Amino acid sequence: MLLLTGCWTTGQGEKVGTVIKVADEGLFRTTHEFEIVRGGMNGGQGSFSIKPSCITVEDTELLQQVRAAFNSQREIVVMYRQELFAPLRSSGECGEVIFDNKFLTSIQVRGEGIASNYQGTK
């Protein structure tokens, strides 16, 4: 029973792309979620990824940065940690209900440095 009550960090990674959705979702507990997808056309050039990545935001400062990135539609780099088991996370439209969930740890505009106050911690 103890094995089903905790969250284990199973990895970390980075994604580059544009925020296409920011939402507060959840049946039992509201969580802040966003979707990032690589792609877009700029001057007739660009590329598209097939499926957006869904990432949960726990830090309110990071949530403000995600909303700003959504509003400006600038390409960003997000760093995240992946947890094996997160039972209170919303399933959203990506269909990731409980396992292999991604949680935002930092965000930066592509081509700019990471400002220290944009670093998420847990």
Image (spheres, rainbow, N blue to C red):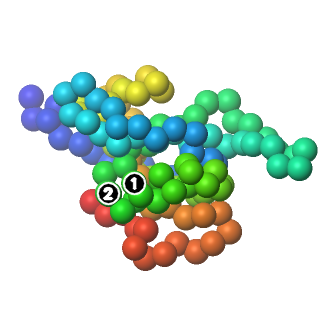
Disc 1 and disc 2 in contact, CB within 8 angstroms: yes
**Quadrant location, the C terminus:** bottom left
Among the 4 quarters of the image, the one containing residue 105: bottom left
Residue 62's x, y, as percent? 40, 59
The answer to whether residue 15 shows anywhere in this view is: no
Residue closest to the eye, 56 or 102 = 56
Q: In this view, does 100 lie above or below 114?
A: above
Asked if residue 73 lies left or right of residue 53, the reply is right
Farthest residue to the left: give it: 1
Residue 42's x, y, as percent? 83, 49
Q: Residue at x 41, y 58 (%)?
A: 64
Q: Which residue is drawn at 31% across and 51% down?
A: 58
Count the labels in the image. Answer: 2
To which residue does mark 2 refer? 59
Type of amino acid under label 2: Asp
To which residue does mark 1 refer? 63
Asked if residue 120 lies left or right of residue 110, the reply is left
Q: In this view, does 85 lie above or below 108?
A: above
Type of amino acid under label 1: Leu
Give the crowd class for mark 1: few <14, some 14-19, many >=20 residues within 10 Å: many
Q: Which residue is drawn at 17% across and 31% down?
A: 4
Among the 4 quarters of the image, the one containing residue 47: top right
Residue closest to the eye, 4 or 55 = 55
Asked if residue 45 lies left or right of residue 29, the reply is right
The answer to whether residue 8 shows anywhere in this view is: yes
Q: In this view, does 90 lie above or below 118?
A: above
Farthest residue to the right: give it: 44
Q: Which residue is drawn at 19% across and 28% down?
A: 28
